[in-house]
Amino acid sequence: MLKIENVQIVGLEPAIRGMRNPMNSWAKSDSKVVEHHVGPINEDFPLFVEVGENDLKLMNALAAGGPVHAKYRRMIVVYLDITAPLYWWKEFDTYKVGTVANSCSTMHKIHSKEFTESDFSWEHLEEVPEPSGVSQTTIDHTLTVLNYYRRRYLETKDKRFWWGMIQTLPSSYNQRRTVMLSYEVLANIYVWRRDHKLDEWHTFCDWIESLPHSELIVIDYRRFHPTLTHEDICKAYGIPDIGEFSDGYHTFNALYHQRAVLFAALVNMNKDRAWKSFKHEDGEACFGGGWFIVGIDTPDGSYTYHYEDKYWDMFHCQELERGKHWDGHTEKDVTRLLGLDV
């Protein structure tokens, strides 16, 4: 069992403002503060920022580039109350960076009320394939022992009975904590917990999906789950195709195509220096398949690009079983191409 209450989201406005600092593009920001925001399952988020179309396009583009580019996600802070069993909190506690939590204390308040079934996450015990009644007997026995220790501790203040409660308390005991974390932390959680075997993580990830602009969080999931296509993510969360983002004149897709055509022209004029292959030097298919590498050996060293299979026939050069050795060149070495005869 996992219950989430009292959600508050802060920091969207300064996050957007900071996101535009690198290019001094504040004039293009079109977001505004509104009274409240109603989420997809009718949660109400007061004093929320309504993100404008221009800002959302930039946020999506940066999120698609991963945590290094989506620094604004670290500035969007979420507060919430979570009630969950100790076995779930044990896993949640692995997320220490960028989180703060204040919990109800089992040390100070464990004896403050009688133990009941509602204090525990025991919903799956009745599904255990044991003889009839065993699970309920286990529940009844646990409650009897805990309440005995509690009663004797209240009567005598003997710490041995307090220890009895502490050391008998099962990990299914539900604890409430008030938590602070960021959209960046939620993105990390979503990647690694969306497909977890615990129901509580499924509930938590469902809640993440209900947050305003959750597409900025869940997009990281695709990097680690390659069976999901870019189109799957875009369709599911309403994310525009990043290839169609534009600087006002050209889209990424158009610029990518133009680069392919121009490099093909250069390769075709230097066939004796050029080569292409569906595999890298180590014999592995480029990016797992569907891509190839094409390169030119210039007087200053080689220079290569990767392209999708659909561009293969555009490059008229030697076909290799495996690509040549990569000499460590980067995009900064593109000037090597100026040494070619054209």
Image (cartoon, rainbow, N blue to C red):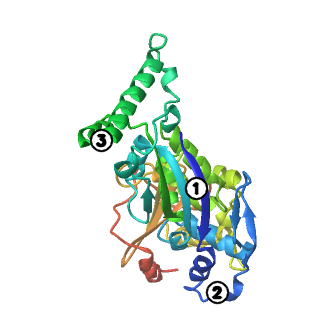
The image quadrant that residue 17 belongs to is bottom right
Please provide percent x and percent y for residue 61. Answer: 61, 69
Mark 3–mark 1 distance (CA, rounded to whole Å): 44 Å
Which residue is tagged 3? 162
The residue closer to the viewer here, 77 or 241, is 77
Q: Name the residue under label 2.
A: 25
The residue closer to the viewer here, 60 or 46, is: 46
Q: In this view, does 239 lie above or below 258?
A: above
Q: How many marks?
A: 3
Q: From where the camera sits, is residue 39 visible?
A: yes
Does residue 313 appear in the picture of this structure?
Answer: no
Place of residue 340 in the rendered image (x, y in percent of width and height, measured from the top left): 46, 79
The disc, 1 or 2, on the residue closer to the chain's N-terminal end is 2
In percent of width and height, residue 62 lies at 57, 70
The alpha-carbon separation of the residues under discs 2 and 3 comes to 61 Å
> In the image, is 153 to the left or to the right of 272?
left
| Camera-side residue of 194 and 333 | 194
Q: Mark 3 packing: few (<14 Cα in 10 Å), some, or many (20+)?
A: many
How far across and how far down the image is residue 10, in percent? 60, 71
Mark 1, residue position: 218
Hey, what amino acid is under mark 2? Answer: Ser
Is label 2 in a helix, a strand or a loop? loop
Circle 3 SS class:
helix
Q: In the image, is residue 162 above or below residue 190?
A: above
Using the numbered discs, state the Cα–Cα distance from disc 1 to disc 2 in whole angstroms.
26 Å
Mark 3 or mark 1: name the one nearer the start of the chain. Answer: 3
